[in-house]
Structure formats: C-alpha cells, structure tokens
Amino acid sequence: MSWNREEMAQRAALLLKDGYYINLGIGIPTKVANYVPKGMHVVLEGENGVLGIGPHPLEDEVDTDLVNASKQTITQLPFTSFFDSAESFAMIRGGHIDMAIMGAMQVSENGDIASWMVPGKIVKGMGGAMDLVSGIEHIVVIMEHTNTNNEPKLVKECTLPLTGHRVVNKVITTMGEFEFLPEGLTLQMLAPGVTLDELRANTTASFRVGI
C-alpha cells in the first residue's frame, strides 16, 4: 500500500493557505486544483499565462482553448484572467506567488531539487522550474518515491543537473510526507500500509523521524 497520485494531490492541498497565490507545475501537481478545501480562497497560477485555474472539467465542460502548463484542459472561475507568459514570469520572478507545487526527478537530503532533465530522454529545455524555485518562497514537491528502475528519488545527493540548491520545504511521495526543518529532513507521515523499514530501504537520503 502507498499513496496514489490523487491521494498525494489531496495531501498537498492540505498545505494551502487562504489568500495564497500558488503555481501548479506539470504532472501530479495539476491535480491539486481538484482538492482545494471548501471555503478556502486561493488563486492557482499557470506559467503559460493563466491566473485562477479551476478544477479539471467534466466531459461536457471541456474547452480545448483553456489549458494549464501541462496542456490539460481546465475550467475558469469568476475571477480567472489570461495574459502572456512574460507577464506570468514577471509575477514569479517578482515574488508575487506564495507557493509552488512541482514534480521532481530527485530531491536531496539538504533540499536540492533536480526536476528538468529526464534520463535517457531528449529534453527541449529546463522550462520555468529554475524561475519557480528562485522566485517563490514555499516549494512543495510531489513525486513517486522511486523511478521506473525502482531507484530512490529521495537521495543523499542529486546526480542529475540541479534546478535549485536548498530550496525545497516539503516533499510528498507515494510512501510518505517529509519536511525540511532546521535540524534536517524529517519524516512527518507514513503512507497507509508503508512501514518505516520499507521506507528506509527505498531512500538513500538521511532523515529524522518526527512521528
């Protein structure tokens, strides 16, 4: 047993705070839009130029002209606005976005993140990830705990090109939830059915147990 992608998105949604402006990265983070707590007002931003992303549309609500940074269709909210990507990155670089929820290939025990180079794949570029981690104060990573080769993604040191150095605040994986505290990487919660021994066997990063 472990958390699936929907459950990881639900865990990440619990970290949202009323009034926050939040960037959702491609992949699993886009699912967070479906789990914003009722009664909470947050504004979800897509770096492709949209502010006010709603939940994923039902089949009869799909408008192929409305997409997020993952090119997935989205819904509008009463306050949704659209603009070019230059304006979007001005918001990010100017410190106007409170939180980024993003995926990663690796996260190290000291908070480094490698998120743009996919091993063995041709990559067009690093995208906006470096802007996100340098311009936004709160960085939350959602990722599988191991890669397709069953190798740990929560590691002692990143072996892939870095996106940012000591920038990650929280990590949610299929096996658990971690936080970077002054005393080091700390396990805050185990996914249901996952034992501490199983977690340690699939993690090369050193971590404290805070539960």
Image (cartoon, rainbow, N blue to C red):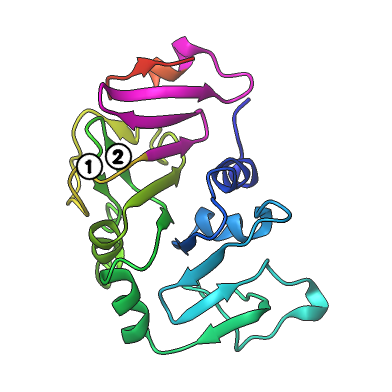
Residue drawn at x 51%, y 87% is 82
- In the figure, 148 relative to 203: above or below? below
Residue drawn at x 35%, y 85% is 87
- In the figure, 182 relative to 168: above or below? above
Give the quadrant of the N terminus.
Answer: top right
Amino acid type assigned to the residue bearing label 1 in the image = Asp
Q: Distance between the residues labelled 2 and 1?
A: 6 Å
Q: Is residue 75 magenta?
A: no
Mark 2–mark 1 CB contact (< 8 Å): yes
Point out the stretch of residues depicted in magenta.
170-198
- In the figure, 162 relative to 202: above or below? below
Q: Does the magenta stretch include residue 180?
A: yes
Residue 140 locus on image (x, y percent): 41, 46
Q: Name the residue under label 1.
A: 112
The single residue placed furthest to the front in the displayed view is 19
Instruction: Give neighbour class at mark 2: few <14, some 14-19, many 20+ (Cα, 10 Å).
Output: many
Q: Mark 2 points at which residue?
A: 107
Q: In front: 104, or 44? A: 44
Residue 41 numbered mark, or none = none
Residue drawn at x 54%, y 51% is 17
Q: In front: 160, or 46? A: 46
Residue 147, can we see it?
yes
- In the figure, 189 relative to 139: above or below? above
Residue drawn at x 27%, y 56% is 133
Amino acid type assigned to the residue bearing label 2 in the image = Val
